[in-house]
Image (cartoon, rainbow, N blue to C red):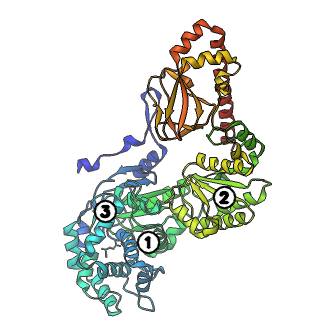
Amino acid sequence: MDALNHQSSRDTELLLQGGYAVQTPLQQFLEACHEEFAVNQSGNLADYIPELARVDPSGFGIAIATIDGHVYEVGDSRVPFTIQSVSKAFVFALALELLGEDRVEAAIGVEPSGEAFNSIRLTSDNKPFNPMVNAGAIACSGLIYRVEGKNAFERIRQSLCAFAGRDLDVDESVFESERATGNRNRAIAWLLHNYAVVENHVDDVLDAYFRQCAVLVTARDLAVMAGTLANRGINPITGKQVIKPHVVARVLSVMTSSGMYDYAGEWIYRVGIPAKSGVGGGIVAALPAQIGLGTYSPRLDSHGNSVRGLEVCKAISSRFDLHVLNRNADVRTCVMSDYDISSVSSRRSRQPHEQQILEDRHDDVRVLELVGALNFAAIDYITRRLAGTQSKASLLVLDFRRVPDLTMAGSRLLASTIKTLGGLGITVILSGVEATSNLISTVVSLTGDDRKPRHFLLLDDAIEWAEDQIIYRFGGFSVVKETSHLKEQALLADLTEAEIEAITSLATARHYKPGQQIVKAGEIANSVFFLQSGMVSIKLPSGVRLASLGPGKEFGEMAMIERTRSADVWADTDVQCLELPIDALTGHGALYPAVSLRILKNLSAVIARRLIQANAKIDVLSAY
Ligand code: GLN
């Protein structure tokens, strides 16, 4: 148990200069809560299951799982206890996944009963009121039994394990104790059998239900389980999708209306976080997109809710203003930057005449970089922003690389905008998305085949494609030049024919095939290349493109200042170039200092131009 009880407080220490360590504010707050509420000894252990009356009444643990995967823990956060009714929320989720909404909803209602958890009353059409009271939970286990038969409990246990992110055991003595004494639940199950809500094998269904209630969890487990609900079904620790997002919404709904039994109305009014409690002393509370909370303290109030757990939830909610209905958001922050290609162009360097077309037509390509989870209101704002501006752009790039999620409503609005813009001759290009992503498939299927938006993984590729369209439209590609003379090289500008000739004689002609690597990051940099025909791409070892170059451009020129190659260079096409060894250039410079000085000045000009462009980019990208 000692190993289990170890605290992860070290992760939450902020290390200050000079070696002082302080706790993050949330850790401090949780510790203060623990101290404050530990003195509260009111409430009683559940004793209608005899074995539950034997637990240590003083146990008290709090844990919070953040959706980025950190777990805060205080007190007995790793002391195991039986999950009891907290399981109901997760088993309901499993029933929805296994049987589908229609079958589950045909058997179990979703109305709050306003009664105690063990109420025997059914609705007027003889269904359990909801899956959060015993009748509904037994019905859920019965539904899972229909699909899984004798394996029902093991299937439930595996699902609880996936939510918790670890293997969970059963407390056999609590299970036996409830099985021996749980006649009220037995009565409920037979009543459900009478109305065909539970089909056959009533005792087996009850066994599965009693076992599911006796699964051992800790406050930490509950926090991770709640964190999974808060994170649209993805366990924030394991990263696994445990249930589908639309099932999450169903589960959180019934937790909101019925999770705390006949205290549900008070709970949503005072705490305002979807939650579920159990007579083992646990409470889970899931605040969508923010945190999962798990508490453990086995003394219960008259509703069967943990007294201290309730105090902790109330304190956290009011201290940090976490009521789900008290939200606000400024949708305008979803557009991180909005620019045309005069400020940020693609990394493909262009021939002078192509460059001229792009400069003349810079406002034909507009880029909106979007950020954050985009819901209905955010996409509506984006569509109004597109409609309201005087942009002349015929190509619109929407970048989604900082968008973790697009809701269905957002997808619908986006798809109809893409269609409308298409009708006006405006092409929408999506970037920052995997071809296989949900976002793409949803938007594409809603848009229809004729106006299917083009999409790219990299924003840079999207901008390059849009630039190509402009160059193509305005006649640029018909005059593409195949080869370049050395006097067009920026590094050799203002040298005489004879001087260029002399330099050329020091160089070696090289030929590369498409896909061949020319320069490797980390190698000794001892030559500079002059590209005469074909295209090369300069990339970081991670694959990020820094530039694509055509005839007339130099590469590897940093060898004149740096002794190690800082990036890879790859041939995109058949490439012809001249490789000039730095040593030869230096030797030449010793004889002809004026030529050497000229080349160095040219190099400075090349670097200065790059710096000016980079500054312009930084400026537009940080202007918002
Ligand atoms: N096993 C318990 C029962 O069915 C669960 C009840 C609860 O936690 N509220 O009575």
Q: Are marks 1 and 3 in contact (CB under 8 Å)?
A: no
Residue nearer the viewer, 189 or 576: 576
- Residue position for label 1: 259
State the quadrant of the C terminus.
top right
Does dot 3 land on a helix, a strand or a loop?
Answer: helix
Q: Are marks 1 and 2 in contact (CB under 8 Å)?
A: no
Where is 173 relative to 8, above or below?
below
Residue lying farthest to the right in this orientation: 390
Crowd around label 2: few <14 · some 14–19 · many ≥20 (10 Å) = many
Does dot 1 land on a helix, a strand or a loop?
Answer: loop
Disc 1 marks a residue whose amino acid type is Gly
Q: Quadrant of residue 403?
A: bottom right
Residue nearer the viewer, 279 or 458: 458
Q: Are marks 2 and 3 in contact (CB under 8 Å)?
A: no
Residue nearer the viewer, 118 or 399: 399
Disc 3 marks a residue whose amino acid type is Cys
- Residue position for label 2: 428
Quick check: 27 left or right of 450? left
At 43% across and 75% down in the image, what residue appears? 261
Crowd around label 3: few <14 · some 14–19 · many ≥20 (10 Å) = some
Disc 2 marks a residue whose amino acid type is Val
At 36% across and 85% down in the image, what residue appears? 120
Along the polypeptide, which appears first: circle 2 or circle 3?
3
